Image (cartoon, helix red, strand yellow):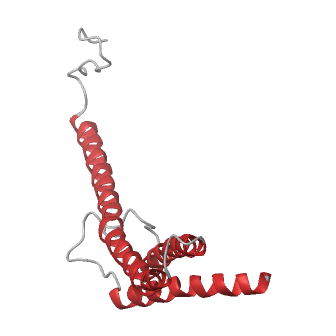
Amino acid sequence: MSPAGGGVPAQRAASADPAVELELARRMADEADRHGQQAELLAQRPALLPTWSPLARAVAVYAGCGAAAGVLVLILVLASGVGLVDGFTLGAWICAGLPAVAFFGGYLVLGRWGRPAMVAGTPPRYLPLGFLICFLVVPMAYCAYLLMVRGLR
């Protein structure tokens, strides 16, 4: 043990073979290079769904945001049923408001967690596809709700 008492190894004896020491140093340098390359590869992957392709990641994010907005549509429909929201406001939120919120939410999520830490340029966010997904999923949730209510009556 060293006088510091902290797990620091004692100095080696001076009679060590320089060729062995050089070989150990080369192995350690190779190991450090390998770990550095692994760190670079990990830094080039985004935090959100790192093994997915950029297109699949964008579809999943926009669909998830659209599904969350679909839940808000159902809450608005229920609020409309008890008279808290009028028909015009409900229609405006279903056709424009919530799809836009879902689209911008997905855009921001992809920009924050869908971007690798180390990348040259900006990765694609697939804006037209996201717009299409969000502006289809939210009204489809309302239509599904209507079909479900009609089917239960």
Q: Is residue 44 above or below residue 99?
A: above
From the viewer's perspective, is residue 11 above or below residue 38? above
Query: How many labels, in total?
Result: 0
- Give the residue at x 65% y 85%: 146
Which quarter shows the N terminus? top left
Q: How far from the left and from the top, in percent, is residue 38?
A: 35, 59
Residue 57 lies, in percent from the top left, at 44, 76
At horizontal 58% and vertical 82% (from top left) the residue drawn is 141
Camera-nearest residue between 76 and 143: 76
Q: Residue at x 27, y 63 (%)?
A: 117
The location of residue 139, given as percent across then percent down, is: 52, 87
Is residue 6 something one can see in this rendering? yes
List x then y, in percent, for residue 26: 26, 47
Q: Nearer the viewer, residue 52 or 103?
A: 103
| Residue 53 visible, this orientation | no
Residue 58 appears in which quarter of the rendering?
bottom left
Quarter-of-image position of residue 89: bottom left
Q: Please identify the quarter of the rendering in which residue 7 is found.
A: top left
Quadrant of image for the C terminus: bottom right
Q: Residue furthest top?
A: 3
Q: Residue at the location (27% across, 18% down)? A: 10
Q: Looking at the image, which is closer to me, 79 or 129?
A: 79
